[in-house]
Amino acid sequence: MRDSLDLLLDGPGEAAVRAEWDALSAAGVPSSGDRTGGHHGPHVTVAERDRVAEDLEARLDELAVRLPLTLRLGPPLVLGGPGRRVLARAVVATPALLDLHAAAAAVLGPGGPPHGEVGAWTPHVTLSGRLGDDDVAGALGALGEAYAVRAVRLRRWMPASGTVRDLPRR
């Protein structure tokens, strides 16, 4: 797994996404809420890299001054291919969000996945990471209307070591 730079939501925003996770589970559909890892929660991945040099930490800290951001969670997206699909809420790409993404890419340099490149990024909040083809209709039927949330924190997630670091570092 790659290291990531993630936007985290305020309490009401996190609760709204978790309510959708619960609605999916109640509909008998796999949900991101089924994951019980200590660091798992609603987030928007801004950038991913196989490796992030330690000397970039101070520059990553500077990105946090762009927060808070109001994010509009729009229509559901179904990503992936037959047999394994990902259900997500699209995050409307505002100029402020796109600027944050471009700034993160500039700090981190090349090396991210093609879908995370500037100009190709699809900001989203994952609702289910493992839908089967037969789950898609039920999943879409369990979701409500679009809504707004606030991104209030930035974190660096390093899955190889299980480390999470809030930015700016304190």
Image (cartoon, rainbow, N blue to C red):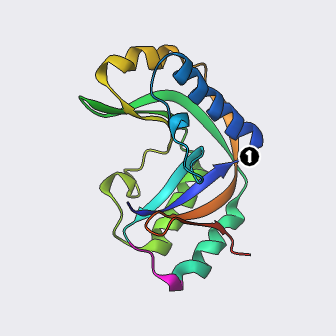
Q: Determine whether, in the image, residue 143 is placed left or right of residue 82.
A: right
Q: Position of residue 90 (x, y in %)?
A: 50, 35
Callout 1: SS: loop
Q: x and y percent of residue 103 in the render?
A: 53, 66
Q: Quadrant of the C terminus?
A: bottom right
Q: Name the residue located 51 percent from the left edge and 56 percent from the top edge.
A: 46
Q: Residue at x 49, y 31 (%)?
A: 31
Q: Quadrant of residue 167?
A: bottom right
Q: Which residue is mark 1?
A: 10
Amino acid residing under circle 1: Asp
Q: Which residues are magenta?
A: 51-55
Identify the residue at the far bottom of this view: 55
Principal secondary structure, stretch drawn in magenta = loop
Residue at the image position 76 percent from the left and 43 percent from the top: 11
Query: In this orientation, does residue 99 appear?
Result: no
Say which quarter of the image contains residue 91.
top right
Q: Is residue 29 above or below residue 38?
A: above
**Above/below status of 86 relative to 43:** above
Looking at the rendering, in which quadrant would you find the N terminus?
bottom left
